[in-house]
Amino acid sequence: MNAPFRPQTATVRPVDLGLSLEQARIEGFVAVQPDGTAFHRPAWLGAVARGTGNRALALIAERDDELCGYLPLIDVRSPLFGRALVSSGFAIGGGILASDRAVADTILAAAEAFALAQGATSLELRGGVLPAARAGWSVRGDAHSGFVRGLADDDEAQLAAIPRKQRAEVRKGLTEDLVVTVGRDWADRRAHYAVYAESVRNLGTPVFPRRLFAEVLDAFGGDADVLTVWHRTTPIASVLSLYHQGAVMPYWGGGTPAARSLRANDRMYYELMLHARRRGCDRFDFGRSKTGSGAHAFKRNWGFEAEPLRYATWTAPGTRGRNIDPTSDSHNASIALWKRMPLGIANLVGPWIARGLG
């Protein structure tokens, strides 16, 4: 009688993301994983590291020399908010990709030890395979929602797919004196940063470093671009989007106060849907919103259904995790102050703060 077959235990090790061979292995692994995202890609990790000054790290699991699991990490450090290894840093997705539960559990245990060896006492996983009743971990699925919907077959069908009230706003935007451009060059980047920086200042949030956007565009190449809506010669709404496995994600976007009356934000997202379909996408990923927020309601107005996003946090015994939740009561005063800050000062100080939020 033959002994029962037992699969070989996976081994986990840190990987040098500076090696092109390792990058290629991981890119190939992510590309075939159903839960793989743009934020798992080494291209994302490298761009974030260069754009923010934080370190890019990764753990891989191997069985018989075959890649069977992967955890991308950004070592986010801040004198204001503390330190954590985040998967993935500056992203809304990431987490463990694994061939099975056993591999995921092996990576989890290795990640805890790896964090302590790096001097970090906190781990954050944004999606992926999450821990199941593992000591030291907390899992939440009520704080944020994601929104994904298929794209229509043509322009008119796309407009008709938008619920009536929101469709009326898009139609108004289509009648305004607006021009839409899509590109990746210096003018596109300059327009996007001007709009985005003003938009997040008005929301009370520090803007990310300008270099982060440039590094992401350079690293992703044709898998990222900037769509901008102009009123005459002034950019008033702009979004930097990522493309991954047939889906477009408008990731960093915003509008100036002038955009509201001209319905430029509505025009922007509709034009992005059309642009994405023309370049071969079949899904529109509207990204993440805080559950119950105005952005959450805005996306539902477009006909998107909210899907809870599950995140997990580990803190070493006797330590406290960081708090970067902008809706936390502890941040209310800071947000109110930031909204009143002159834009020039906000753009000067903001990147120093934002590179530690991750």
Image (cartoon, helix red, strand yellow):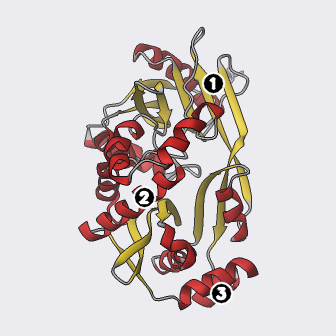
Please tell me whether mark 1 sits on a helix, a strand or a loop: loop
Foreground label between 1 and 2 = 2
Q: How dense is the environment of label 3, judged by Cα within 10 Å: few (below 14), some, or many (20 and up)?
A: few
**Nearer to the camera, 233 or 121:** 233
Q: Judge left or right: residue 215 versus residue 275.
A: left
Q: Position of residue 218 (x, y in %)?
A: 28, 57
Tell me the number on the disc at residue 6: 1
Counting residues from the start of the chain, the first of labels 1 and 3 encountered is 1
Taking the spot 36% from the left edge, 30% from the top edge, the residue there is: 15
For label 2, the SS is helix
Q: Give me the C-alpha separation between circle 2 and circle 3.
A: 33 Å
Kindly identify which residue carries mark 3. 157
Q: Nearer the viewer, residue 262 or 128?
A: 262
Residue picked out by circle 2: 198
Quick one: label 2, few (<14), some, or many (20+) residues within 10 Å?
Answer: many
Q: Secondary structure at mark 3?
A: helix
